Image (cartoon, rainbow, N blue to C red):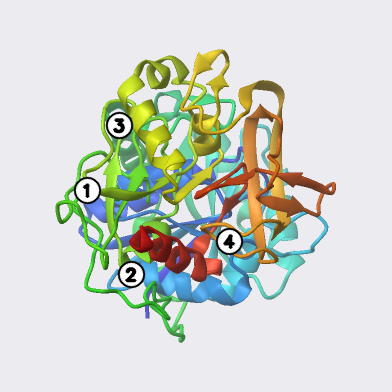
Amino acid sequence: MVARLVIAAPSSGSGKTTVATGLMAAFAQAGLAVSPHKVGPDYIDPGYHALATGRPGRNLDAYLCGPDLVGPLFAHGAAGCDLAVVEGVMGMFDGAAGQGELASTAHVAKLLRAPVVLVVDASSQSRSVAALVHGFASWDPEVRIGGVILNKVGSDRHEELLREALDSSGVPVLGALRRAPQVRAPSRHLGLVPVAERRAEALDSVAALAEQVRQGCDLEAVLALARSAGAWSGEAWDPGAGSVPAGSAVSDGSAAPGGSAAPGGSAVPGGSAARPVVAVAGGAAFSFSYAEHAELLAAAGADVVGFDPLHDERLPEGAAGLVIGGGFPEVYAPELSANEPLRKAVADLATGGAPVAAECAGLLYLTRELDGKPMCGVLDAHARMAESLTLGYREAVAVSDSVLAPAGTRMRGHEFHRTVVEPGAGPAPAWGLHAPERRVEGFVQQGVHASYLHTHWAAEPGIARRFVERCAAG
């Protein structure tokens, strides 16, 4: 049994990340082993969760991975922990568009049979807060809201009015947090600035959040609520299920807390046919990755070694394959372009036929240029910043055979970018997307699979096995 709770809110911007990260940090500092989780596909919040707990931040996405995998992935991440804190997404009942509760915070709370703490932005209300909480508490009887944390409270008098209003609601107030601009993390076009870009400042912010939560919340009551979740049965997800590990493991430093690859790390020099070296891009420009991807690659028999394209002029020694996930290459285009030795090494590896998996930021890095700055030139395409954000879940089918999947493979994915690649697809496209409009997208050429689509490989473990097998085949 793992004590667990879900942090939800009526809407985005209410303070879920503030409260969830602060609770994680406060409990971790109190000596508890805290397992951090995030509902939905978001990569950035788990980085702050990892900083707060010292453990990888993990996503629970019932759309990308399917509802049946939410529990096992949770159990995998929470194994051996005293407490699991799950930060929700958007408003509590907001899920995949047009698909009811699927992938909503409420859906995941029900799958985990976990109590919910509702974070309410109280900045512009007093007595009305009772009606709001009553509505959320009674909307779905299968969701148990076990307490409320009032956020952005203006004064002692304001807090008193809010508590009086909630006295008869039947939902206890577990805390009240004052407005505290000093603990806010900076944002830009895709949300918060990732931890990888501001680690020192982020550490200070997380420490401030922990102190704010300690001062404003009844931690004993929060922990008691988490422990009231009761037993949860079910097997934990196993990254090696169906794989032949060949005795390999993730190299030291290859996967930083939060799942993003980190520079450095070590592997058997040159690797071997049974244990190919898979280089995984990380650092400030490529900080988006799910923790399970490195675990799947390792379980499939690879030595996973991280590197930072902003600073490393060579790929890891013996690299037989390359994974470049998401991030912000548009922010670092001049620095990435200036690293000519690495751009050449990436181009040589790709044109030599080695397996290369590039998602979103990785796609941009493989184009000829990004906002006029030369990139690796592997793909005959150009990338630029766009005026609007492309965001949403996607149904996809593999159009072309690739190092990741045979043609016809069906996957669910997520797009999240404010850039455009022209053309949007090569002669052999990567994916055919079915919603919101039908189109082909991405590039498959030689061993390269490059696409805007983010996928969660735990949904189809054969992806990692196929990729490693191609790396081993040389």
Q: Residues within 10 Å of mark 3 (few under 14, many from 20)?
A: some
Disc assigned to residue 253 = 1
3D distance between C-alphas at marks 3 and 2: 29 Å
**Upstream in sequence: badge 4 or badge 3:** 4
3D distance between C-alphas at marks 4 and 2: 22 Å
Left or right: where does residue 469 sit relative to residue 453? left
Left or right: where does residue 316 sit relative to residue 333? left
* Residue at x 53%, y 46% (from the top left corner): 16
3D distance between C-alphas at marks 4 and 3: 26 Å
| Number of the front mark, 2 or 1 | 2
Residue 180 to residue 414: above or below: above
Residue that numbered label 3 is attached to: 199
What kind of element bears circle 3?
Answer: helix
Q: Amino acid at mark 2?
A: Ala
Disc assigned to residue 61 = 4
Q: Are marks 4 and 3 in contact (CB under 8 Å)?
A: no
Q: Amino acid at mark 1?
A: Gly
